[in-house]
Amino acid sequence: MKFILHITEDTTVEQINRGFVMQAVSFLVHSLLALGSWVGLMLIGSAIHPAGISHWAILLLSMAIPVGVGIVVCSIRRDEMAATVWLAGVIWVLLFSLYLLDLPTGPGHCFQCSATEKLARSFLSWPSPSGLVDNDAPFLATWPAAALIGYAMGAKLGMIRSK
């Protein structure tokens, strides 16, 4: 991630702003590609509806499919911003963690859980689901974040491969 700005006498504020806007648009496009590949995985999974697939297998696929997409996209067109979309995944997990920690607990809803147990049982359903947010925390936070992180890893591999 390079934000090095070479300012010369000919550089204008408009040129500087255009560069930042292009970086923001690139970040958004790559984030949408990562999340789009994950949504595609979820749509195929809901169409096939495999019985008994574990949350861990879905987590692995949520990361592996975007890795492949990131490799392909950045092999075709190198873009440094593609390797930074993992930040969006981390920020999303942190924001969702704050939301989860603020939720009230009770019987059937992670009763008397510590903060660590509340997060582990919500995000990973380990050792058992927490009951918070209708046990949808992996779908709402874990798997999309894994897709963004996986895409960034694939993008980095794609850029290395295309050298």
Image (cartoon, rainbow, N blue to C red):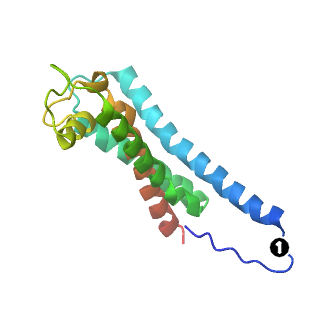
Q: Position of residue 161 (x, y in %)?
A: 48, 67
Q: Residue at x 44, y 48 (%)?
A: 91
Q: Which residue is at a point 48% across and 56% down the rendered structure image?
A: 71
Q: Residue at x 50, y 53 (%)?
A: 85
- List the residue tagged with mark 1: 11
Residue 7 picture quarter: bottom right
Query: In this view of the protein, can residue 77 be seen by the observer?
Result: yes
| SS category of the residue bearing label 1 | loop
Closer to the camera in the image, 116 or 50: 116
Quadrant of the image containing the N terminus = bottom right
- Vertical placement of 160 versus 155: above or below? below
Amino acid type of disc 1?
Thr
In the rendered view, tell whether residue 108 sits above or below residue 123: above
Q: In the image, is 88 to the left or to the right of 30?
A: left
- In the drawing, does residue 10 fall left or right of residue 51? right
Q: From the viewer's perspective, tell me whether residue 161 is left or right of residue 130.
A: right
User: Quadrant of the image for the C terminus?
Assistant: bottom right
Residue 81 in the image: state x and y as whole percent. 57, 59
Count of marks overlaid on the render = 1
Query: Where is residue 43 shown, x and y percent of the image?
Result: 43, 26
